[in-house]
């Protein structure tokens, strides 16, 4: 899967669940729940010791799920993530070395870029889609719209502060590839094995995508 195909999947799914797994034993069940609920993508953050094993378990046991790694800060983590089965890499900021490492290997990569300088640099590296993080504190949709004027060739993946209350406006905006969010996969729900509740929240999110993007669903 190349960068373009990955972006197409993100655009179709609409919302990328950002997952923090404390215990890899929950990974497969969570992956199945995401798939059953209609958001078959997981950005598993490299913030916990369980990330690598969780990516491996999900990749091996959840065939319909697109599994990637988030919060990847350096090449070493990217190597471990890819070896475990991650099919895309998300980073909170624009790390040139990490981004180049992924591009050289045809691994879809979505670094964070918030300013004209950072977006410009991402474009120069050959990217057309960047993560926009932390989206709401950094100005949200009005900031993205303003950036879109000079960067009409760029699409954004806003993440941070997105919820059912504001996700519709993002999804209806053409320069938004997909939104990232954790509200449907909160750590507290995972820790309590609230799988039915998680699936209901995932379904609700998938319904919002269909409502806002009828042409692509
Ligand atoms: C993150 O990296 O934590 C993501 O931005 C998720 O943010 P959220 O919890 O506000 O959805």
Image (spheres, grey):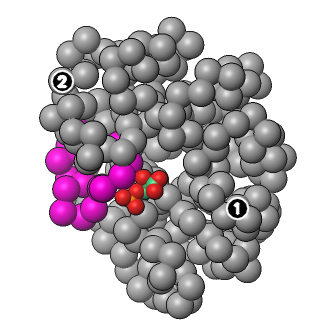
Tell me if I can see residue 142 in this picture: yes
Q: Earlier in the sequence, mark 2 or mark 1?
A: 1
Residue 138 vs residue 82, the one in the foreground: 138
Q: State the mark number for residue 157.
A: none
Q: Secondary structure at mark 1?
A: helix
Q: Which residues are magenta?
A: 157-173
Residues packed near mark 1 inside 10 Å, few (<14), some (14 to 19) or many (20 plus): many
Q: Is residue 142 left or right of residue 12?
A: left
Q: Is residue 48 left or right of residue 43?
A: right
Proximity of marks 2 and 1: CB atoms separated by less than 8 Å: no
What residue is at 24 percent from the left and 64 percent from the top? 164
Q: State the mark number for residue 51.
A: 1
Q: Secondary structure at mark 2?
A: helix
What residue is at 23 percent from the left and 41 percent from the top? 140
Residue 137: in magenta span? no
Q: Which quarter of the figure has residue 77?
A: top right
Q: Is residue 156 left or right of residue 212?
A: right
What residue is at 42 percent from the left and 63 percent from the top? 182
Q: State the mark number for residue 146.
A: 2
Q: Which quarter of the figure has residue 147?
A: top left
In percent of width and height, residue 29 lies at 64, 79
Residue 186 vs residue 172, the one in the foreground: 186
């Amino acid at each position: 899967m190349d960068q373009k195909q990955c972006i197409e999947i993100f655009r179709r799914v609409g919302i990328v669940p950002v997952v923090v797994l404390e215990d890899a034993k929950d990974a497969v069940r969570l992956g199945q729940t995401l798939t059953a609920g209609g958001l078959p993508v997981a950005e598993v953050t490299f913030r916990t010791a369980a990330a690598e094993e969780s990516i491996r378990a999900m990749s091996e046991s959840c065939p319909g799920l697109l599994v990637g790694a988030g919060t990847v800060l350096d090449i070493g983590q990217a190597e471990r993530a890819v070896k475990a089965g991650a099919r895309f890499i998300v980073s909170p900021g624009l790390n040139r070395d990490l981004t180049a490492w992924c591009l050289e290997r045809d691994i879809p990569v979505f670094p964070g870029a918030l300013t004209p300088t950072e977006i410009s640099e991402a474009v120069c590296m050959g990217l057309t889609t960047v993560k926009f993080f932390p989206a709401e504190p950094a100005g949200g949709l009005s900031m993205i719209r303003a950036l879109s004027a000079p960067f009409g060739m760029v699409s954004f993946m806003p993440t941070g502060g997105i919820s059912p209350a504001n996700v519709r406006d993002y999804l209806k905006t053409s320069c938004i590839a997909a939104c990232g969010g954790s509200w449907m996969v909160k750590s507290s729900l995972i820790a309590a094995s609230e799988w039915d509740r998680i699936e209901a929240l995932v379904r609700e999110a998938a319904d919002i995508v269909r409502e806002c993007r009828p042409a692509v669903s």
